Amino acid sequence: MKIFPAVDIREGRAVRLREGDYSRMTVYGDPVLAARSFLADGAGAVHVVDLDGALTGRPENAPVVAEIAALGMETEIGGGIRSRDSIEMYLAAGASRVILGTVAAEDPAFAEECIRAYGDRIAVGVDARDGKVAVRGWKTLTDLDAYDFCMRLGDAGVGAIVYTDISRDGMLSGMNIPAYRRLAKTHGLRIVASGGLTKREEIAQLAEAGVYGAILGKAMYEGVLPLKDALAAAKEASCSQNA
């Protein structure tokens, strides 16, 4: 299982939100320096979110994202990517994978078109609050059932889903393990779990469930679960699964 240390970018700074609330934001400094520290700690992947872009629907921190992608880690980027031009810009900048969020919920035909065009270089971000899909920077709650939406994405050919339980995000309260166990059994989707990763034991539980990866954010920045410990736990879990 892969660990994706997270860099959420707001106004050029690395930040973390609590439950997706832009008014409850903690600033952690330079996002490129943060990504370099991940690389130094042994990370092979990084999860980047343009929070400004998620609100405006346009890439707002593209130069910073390009600097991070140039570090050579497997870089996935989400936040405000709602056009082919944005996708191609990020892929040309070195991103390994682009995450469609709002546009996948609001324009499924466009998402399917992108999957056909770019294959595994496209993932879909499903952000859930109270079982419903949230869009536009988590500000708008739709009537879409999050689990049913994931099943439809699998039917449409999506290979990877980044699933965030918004109520757990940035709260250091632990992950919604039952939700990820259920999702990991759906259509053979590669699930990247996001929201509340706090303990090494959760990494083992996710690996046992067949989850592809997990995003590490607030717990890493606050020293509750250092990145090196999370990477070691993921390696141990993978070895146990392969034994």
Image: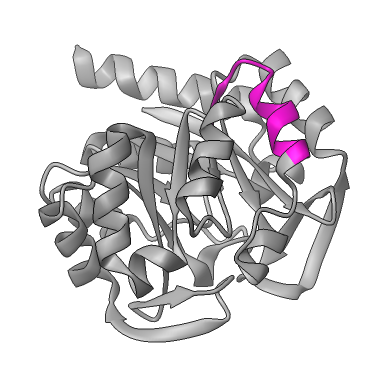
202 or 180, nearer to the observer: 180
Image quarter in which the N terminus is found? top left
Tell me which residue sits at (16%, 47%) in the image. Answer: 157
Residue 223 visible somewhere in the drawing: no
Tell me which residue sits at (49%, 60%) in the image. Answer: 82
43 or 87, nearer to the observer: 87
Q: Is residue 159 above or below residue 143?
A: above
The x, y position of residue 136, in whole percent, is 55, 74
**Does residue 75 appear to the left or right of 116 in the view shown?**
right
**Does residue 225 appear to the left or right of 129 in the view shown?**
right
Residue 230 visible somewhere in the drawing: yes
The x, y position of residue 5, in whole percent, is 60, 35
Image quarter in which the C terminus is found? top left
226 or 160, nearer to the observer: 160
Residue at the extreme right of the image, as rendered: 29
Labels in figure, total: 0
Q: Which residues are magenta?
A: 63-75
Q: Is residue 174 above or below residue 77?
A: below
The x, y position of residue 15, in whole percent, is 78, 53
The x, y position of residue 230, in whole percent, is 54, 29
Please identify the quarter of the rendering in which residue 20 is found: bottom right
